[in-house]
Structure formats: C-alpha cells, structure tokens
C-alpha cells in the first residue's frame, strides 16, 4: 500500500493544548498547535484584543488567502496513493485514506464543517448532538460521551473525524480498532477558514473551499460595512446558562460569543472580567446596565419575563427598551460553534444591535 506524506512540519503540541494554547504561540512551524491550526495561538491572542470588525475581517481574509495557496499546492501523481499522511488540527500525523467514502463524525462542529463542504454524502454516522442535513435525516448516531464502539465497527468507516472536545480515550480506542481518527478544530471565527482547508484536503473536497470561504468573506464584509454605519455600539450582555439564576454563566472576553458581539456591532459589557466564560452576580449586570441582552439559553426556558423577576433587573435598559433577544435553538447552536453557521447569527444580530 503506497503512502504520501503531506509536506508540513509536525507540531509538537498535544491535543489538550487545543483548548488552552500556550501564550506567545507565534504560529511558526514547529511551535505547537499554531503551526498546524492556521496560527491558532496567534489568532486567539489577536481576537482577545480585537476592536473594530475590520480587524477580524482582515484576519479571516489573510487566513483564506493562505489556505487557498495551500490547497493549490497539493501535488498530483499519476498513480494516486491509497493513503496520505496529513497533520490534523491537533498536530497529529494521521494516515488517512485518499478520498474517504465512509466517514463517522464524533462532534457537532466537525459535522457542520463536513456538511458545509458538501460532504454529507460521505458521512455514514454522527454523534448524538450533530445536526442532520435535510438530505440525510436517518443517519445513525453512535453516542457522545459514551460511544457505541460495536456500532462504529459494524459500520466499517474508513475515517473517523473528531474535534478538540473529543476525549483522547475515544481517539485511542478507535485507533486500536484500526480506524484512523482525524481531528478538525475551529474555535475562533478566523480559524474557520484554515479548518475548512485542512478538512477539505482530508476528505477530498478541496474544490469546495474557494467558493465557500469567498462567500463567508463577502458576508462578513457586508456586515462590517453596516456596523461602520451604526451611530454607536450598544452594550451587550450575553447569557449562556442560568442553571443557577443568581449566578448565571455569561460570555466574557476571548469567547466565541464575544467575537460575535464585536462583529455584529455590539460591545461586551463583561469585557473587563478577564475570563471567557465567567459566572457573574446579578448585581454586576445591574451595575453595567446593558442596552441589549442576548439569551443563548432561551431554548431552555429563559425569557424576558424570567429576567424581569430577578432582583433589580426589571429596570435594566434592555428590558425597559424591549431589547432582549431570545435566540432560537438553531441560532443558539450557531453561536456555540465556530462553523459557517455562525455567520447566520451575526447577520441576524447586527440590525438588532443597530436599532435604537
């Protein structure tokens, strides 16, 4: 069986570093996840300090240009190899089949990226939480926190695709079954384009990358122009989880929701908190008096009426001015993962942030 090696240096960072990249990662070859994930460490630091939406757009465009050059540089051979050794987003060298035909996806973000590339015909099963494309409503589900390894084996996949949330134990267990596991990671909006490029090369859908990323850049530029026309950026409070209604979890700086707020023309009222997913007091939100409240937990029953019952919240500007945005399940999911679907949410929010 012949094998082709992808001409890319092997990063040294382990899978765990995907969630918390080392500070100072430059994205140069051999420095860790940044080397293989489209400069993940550098991109993350840029976004933590991002201001105008133009900066975020420029990062996406630079990433898109780099990935298009990379896709165009793949050598062609007269006799196609059976496998190709490629570096995944976790920095792992994985021998993947050339043009795989039977893919199992273990994460919603991975599934959405595959479907965005038009690869739904290649997928034979997904995890319990992945959305199903209209053309494949009956795809089997193989579990999530606990996988059905017998079902996975019976399906005879030639490639399993996971994400940064996929436990190492699952990766090792599937690898022991003789099935290659390839990790695709997209945790920031600028990281979507590099993730698409790597994934497209792994599943044989490189022709889909250029039109898809060009469309995303066009949409982002249109939103950016609309944001530039706004008279001001309203203060936004983005709530994620109110299991404890006295100390809800919210979006802080460095979170995906924080990037969405910035791109859509808002200003995160928790920008000074210093952590991406803080648990905040009700008094802290009253003190900041957000002009807009986004409820990503609306699908779980949190609404304007329940907010008004919290101490002193009935007088918040967002409630008195009726600017509480209750996200639908589909839009809430879009805001939870860095995939092309996040652009639907950005386009939905921008005119609502801009309205007086």
Image: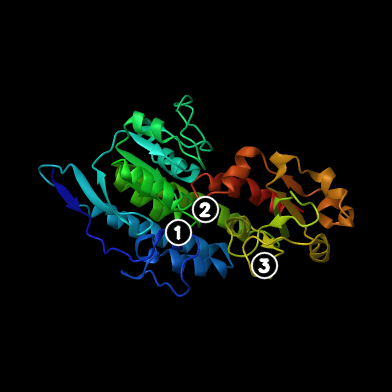
Q: Are marks 2 and 1 in contact (CB under 8 Å)?
A: yes
Q: Which mark is residue 271?
A: 3
Q: Of 53 and 330, which appears nearest the observer?
A: 330
Please give the residue where the numbered disc 1 appears in the rendered image. Answer: 60
Q: Are marks 3 and 1 in contact (CB under 8 Å)?
A: no
Marked residue nearer the N-terminal end (3 or 1): 1
Other-residue count near label 2 (Cα within 10 Å), few / some / many at <14 / 14–19 / ≥20: many
Left or right of residue 50, residue 99 in this image: left
Determine which quarter of the picture holds residue 180. Answer: top left
SS label for mark 1: helix
Query: Which of the two discs, 2 and 3, sits closer to the camera?
Result: 3
- The quarter of the picture where the N terminus appears is top left
Q: Measuring from the top left, give residue 30's x and y in whole percent.
A: 31, 69
Is residue 81 shown left or right of residue 237? left
The residue that disc 2 covers is 220
Cβ atoms under marks 2 and 3 closer than 8 Å: no
Horizontal arrangement in the rendering, residue 217 relative to residue 263 (left or right): left
């Amino acid at each position: 069986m012949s094998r082709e090696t992808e001409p890319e240096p092997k990063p040294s960072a382990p899978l765990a570093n995907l969630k918390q990249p080392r500070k100072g990662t430059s994205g140069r070859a051999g420095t860790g996840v940044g080397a293989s994930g489209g400069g993940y460490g550098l991109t993350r630091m840029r976004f933590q300090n991002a201001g105008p939406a133009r900066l975020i757009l420029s990062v996406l465009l630079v990433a898109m240009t780099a990935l298009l050059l990379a896709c165009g540089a793949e050598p062609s051979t007269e006799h196609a190899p059976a496998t190709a050794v490629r570096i995944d987003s976790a920095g792992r060298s994985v021998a993947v089949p050339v043009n795989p035909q039977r893919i199992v996806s273990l994460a919603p973000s991975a599934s959405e990226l595959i479907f965005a590339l038009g690869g739904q015909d290649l997928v034979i099963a997904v995890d319990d939480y992945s959305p199903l494309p209209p053309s494949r409503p009956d795809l089997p589900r193989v579990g999530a926190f606990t996988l059905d390894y017998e079902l996975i084996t019976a399906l005879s996949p030639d490639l399993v695709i996971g994400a940064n949330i996929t436990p190492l134990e699952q990766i090792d267990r599937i690898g022991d079954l003789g099935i290659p596991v390839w990790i695709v990671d997209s945790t920031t909006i600028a990281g979507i384009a590099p993730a698409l490029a790597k994934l497209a090369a792994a599943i044989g859908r490189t022709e889909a990358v250029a039109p898809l990323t060009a469309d995303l850049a066009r949409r982002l530029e249109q939103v950016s122009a609309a944001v530039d026309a706004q008279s001001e950026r309203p203060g936004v409070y983005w709530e994620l989880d109110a299991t404890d209604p006295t100390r809800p979890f919210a979006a802080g700086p460095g979170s995906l929701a924080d990037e969405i707020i910035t791109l859509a023309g808002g200003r995160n009222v928790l920008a000074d908190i210093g952590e991406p997913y803080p648990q905040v007091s009700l008094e802290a939100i009253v003190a900041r008096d957000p002009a807009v409240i986004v409820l990503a937990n609306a699908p779980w029953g949190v609404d304007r009426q329940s907010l008004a019952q919290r101490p002193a919240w009935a007088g918040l500007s967002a409630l008195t001015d009726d600017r509480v945005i209750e996200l639908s399940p589909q839009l809430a999911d879009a805001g939870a993962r860095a995939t092309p679907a996040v652009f639907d949410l950005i386009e939905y929010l921008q005119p609502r942030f801009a309205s007086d």
